Image (cartoon, helix red, strand yellow):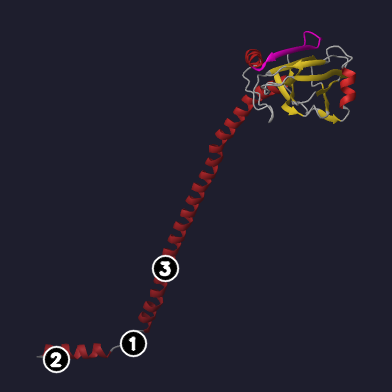
């Protein structure tokens, strides 16, 4: 009984106690707990910040690696293009050396049709007949004494096709020659000597595909040479031979009387 009374008395005393009776302990616990929590919070933030910085550093390193890898991937492509360009340059240079770009001819027309015909009738080999289905080609080599070739022509009654080509083959003869052939013969000769040729409609202009020795100055077009004089000139692009083509291959029934002259000019 004495023990139970003593324990109840002790419990009543303990229950009457409060934290205010121990200011030192209470203040110490109250002061330390926020510090502990702040320290823990600081540690977690610092660890998360350090992790964030590490992640950012890794991201920068990865991006740096990708940035460095990009030029490395582009380099082979650029190198390949340079290699291809370098490989094609000698070829293109060689082609340009053999066939520099040709300037278009200077052309004109004149109403002095009767005067030209009257004059050319008195000159030898200046009036010819280009038969139906035929092509007449006048070969005019370049000469050192001149700088350009000139031409004039007219016809009786009907038009005729006319075009100019230049053969870069070195000149072996200075004589002006005339070659008359049927359209099929002319095609066979050009295919054999100058490469594949496909003749288009003369009225729309011929489309000729040739080798490196032959270049087109003026495609073959039908000219109203029976209504006016057709003339023109072309500066020598270098050594070679002009091919002046008078084309009547499109005509099935009519022969054409051609008045023409070709001469040089300084």
Query: What segment is highlighted magenta in the picture?
Result: 171-183
Tell me where residue 45 sits by quadrant.
bottom left
**Depicted 45 relative to depicted 177: above or below:** below
Q: CA distance from mark 1 to mark 2?
A: 25 Å
- Residue at image x 66%, y 17%? 183
Q: Which residue is mark 2?
A: 5
Tell me where residue 110 sits by quadrant.
top right
- Disc 2 on helix, strand or loop? helix
Q: CA distance from mark 2 to mark 3?
A: 49 Å
Q: Quadrant of the C terminus?
A: top right
Query: Tag 3: Cα neighbours inside 10 Å, few (<14), some, or many (≥20)?
Result: few
- Residue at image x 82%, y 19%? 260
Q: Quadrant of the N terminus?
A: bottom left
**Residue that lies at the very extreme toward the top in this rendered image:** 172
Q: Position of residue 165 (x, y in %)?
A: 73, 21
- Disc 3 on helix, strand or loop? helix
Q: Position of residue 97 (x, y in %)?
A: 72, 21
Compared across the picture, whether 97 is left or right of 154 comes to: left
Q: In the rendering, which numbered label is found on residue 122?
A: none
- Residue at image x 87%, y 16%? 121
Q: Position of residue 87 (x, y in %)?
A: 62, 24
């Amino acid at each position: 009984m004495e023990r139970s009374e003593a324990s109840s008395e002790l419990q009543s005393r303990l229950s009457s106690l409060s934290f205010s009776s121990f200011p030192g302990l209470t203040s110490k616990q109250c002061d330390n707990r926020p510090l502990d929590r702040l320290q823990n919070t600081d540690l977690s933030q610092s660890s998360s910040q350090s992790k964030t910085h590490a992640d950012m550093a890794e991201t920068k390193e990865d991006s740096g690696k990708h940035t460095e890898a990009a030029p490395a991937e582009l380099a082979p492509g650029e190198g390949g293009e340079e290699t291809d360009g370098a490989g094609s340059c000698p070829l293109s240079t060689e082609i340009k050396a053999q066939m520099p770009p040709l300037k278009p001819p200077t052309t004109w027309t004149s109403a002095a049709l009767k005067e030209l015909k009257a004059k050319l009738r008195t000159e030898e080999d200046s009036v010819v007949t280009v038969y139906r289905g035929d092509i007449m080609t006048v070969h005019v080599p370049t000469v050192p004494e001149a700088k350009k070739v000139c031409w004039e022509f007219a016809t009786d009654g009907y038009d005729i096709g006319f075009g100019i080509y230049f053969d870069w083959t070195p000149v072996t003869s200075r004589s002006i020659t005339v070659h008359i052939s049927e359209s099929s013969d002319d095609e066979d000769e050009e295919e054999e000597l100058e490469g594949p040729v496909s003749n288009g409609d003369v009225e729309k202009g011929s489309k000729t595909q040739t080798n490196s020795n032959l270049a087109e100055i003026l495609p073959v077009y039908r000219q109203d040479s029976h209504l006016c004089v057709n003339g023109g000139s072309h500066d020598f692009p270098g050594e070679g031979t002009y091919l002046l083509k008078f084309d009547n291959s499109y005509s099935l029934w009519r022969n054409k009387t051609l008045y023409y002259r070709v001469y040089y000019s300084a």
